Amino acid sequence: MNLPTTFSQLISPASWLGVALGLAVAAPAHAQTPFQGLEHLFTPPKGYVVQHTSQPLTLDGNLRESDWQKAPWTTDFVDIEGSKKPLPTYQTRVKMLWNDSTLFIAATLQEPQIWATQTHHDDIIYKDNDFEVFIDPDNNAHQYFEVEVNAINKIFDLYLPKPYRDKGDALISWDVAGLRSGVAINGTLNQPQDQDKSWTVEMAIPLKALRMGFPWQPPAEGTQWRINFSRVEWDTKVAGTKNPKLQNAAGKDLPEHNWVWSPQGVINMHYPERWGYLQFTRQAGTTWQLPVAELRKQCLWLVYYRQQQFKEKNGRYAANLAELKIEPQAQVDKQVNQLELAATPYQFTATITAAGS
C-alpha cells in the first residue's frame, strides 16, 4: 500500500471523519457508504504536542522537576474499543518531554492493589498489570517499537517489522539501547491486605534507539510520530499474601482490560494506523496540527480493510475498486482526489493523488 509522503496543508483534527466520508458524497443519504461497518476504525486520533526541555531529569517516577510540572497531562485513558465500552475503573494519564537525544515519558496509574510477579527483563510483562508504549517514528505502520513495564520496573521491549495481521513476527531479542526508567509507588507492593493509591513510571527513551537500518536525525520542528499507550489491568482478588486473577467457570483467567490513550476501535494494539500523534516542538503555545495527507491516507486504509474482507470471503484480492464498492473519486479537504487500485489475486497497491498534483 503506497502512502503519500508530502505533508503540505494543515487542518483541524476535528474534521477527520467528516472529510474522510467525502468519499461517499455522491451517494444518496439512505445508501450504504464505503465506511459502513468500519466506523470504529475511522474515529479521530488524539494528538500531543511535546515540549523541548534542557532540564536534567531524575528518572525516579516522582516528576518533581519544574519542566515536568509544566508539561500537560493527556486526557484520561479510555477503553481500547472507544465509546462503545464503559470508561475505565481507574484513571491513567501520560505526559511527555524531549531533548535533542531523548524522549521522556511519564505515566501515572491509579491502582488500589499494586502487584507484580514478572521479575526478569523480557518476561511477558503483560501477564501483570502493566503500562505499554507503542512508537512508529516514520508513520508507515511498519518498523515500530513496543516497550512494556510493570510496577517493579521490569521491561519487555520488542521490535516489529510489520503487524501480526500482516504476518509480522516480533523481535523480542531487540532492546532499546540506553533505555532508563524508574517507578514510584504510592502505596505498597505485593501487600494485598492494604489499599494503595497509584504507581508512576518515568522512562527516558534514546531517540536514536528507535531506528532499524536507517539514518537517525533529531526531530525537526513540527515532526510528527505515531504513538499510543496501553494499560493492561487484570481482575484479581485478595487471597492471603497474593492477588490471584479471577477465573471463569472453566478455570481460565478472565480477559484483561485494555485501557488506552487514543482508542484503537478494536481489541488489538497492533493497528499502528490507529495510534495517536506526537508532535515535537521547541516553541511554547504550539498546537497540534494534522496534515491533510493524513486524511488522504484514510482512503487508502479503507481500501486495505475492504481488501482483507474481500480476500477472506473470496480467496483473492479484488481486481478493482468497483469490486470493493468504493468510488474512485474522494473529496478530501474540499479537494477532489483520485483513488487507484492495482491488484493481482495475491497482492495490491492503492494510491491516492490530489487533483492537479
Image (cartoon, rainbow, N blue to C red):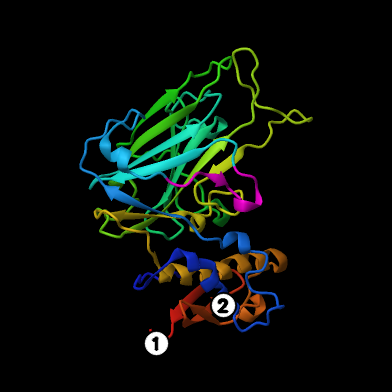
Residue 343 visible somewhere in the drawing: no
The residue positioned 37% from the left and 34% from the top of the image is 202
Nearest the camera: 264 or 253?
264
Above or below residue 1? Residue 170 is: above
- Give the residues in magenta: 74-87
Nearest the camera: 220 or 22?
22
The residue positioned 34% from the left and 48% from the top of the image is 210
The residue positioned 30% from the left and 47% from the top of the image is 207
Q: Position of residue 4 (x, y in %)?
A: 41, 71
Most frequent secondary structure within the magenta stretch: loop
Which image quadrant is residue 112 in? Answer: top right
Above or below residue 162? Residue 176 is: above
What residue does disc 1 label?
356
What residue does disc 2 label?
23
Toward the left, the furthest residue is: 54
Callout 2: helix, strand or loop?
A: helix
Which image quadrant is residue 226 in? Answer: bottom left
Total tally of numbered discs in the picture? 2
Which quadrant holds the C terminus? bottom left
Above or below residue 150? Residue 298 is: below
Toward the right, the furthest residue is: 249
Residue 105 visible somewhere in the drawing: yes
Q: Is residue 112 left or right of residue 172?
A: right
Magenta region includes residue 81: yes
Magenta region includes residue 234: no
Mark 2 and mark 1: Cα distance apart in space? 18 Å
Q: Where is residue 133 in the image (x, y as percent from the top left)?
A: 44, 43
Q: Where is residue 98 in the image (x, y as percent from the top left)?
A: 28, 46
Q: In this view, does 157 lie to the left or right of 281?
A: right
Above or below residue 292? Residue 65 is: above
Give, as a three-letter code, the residue at label 1: Gly
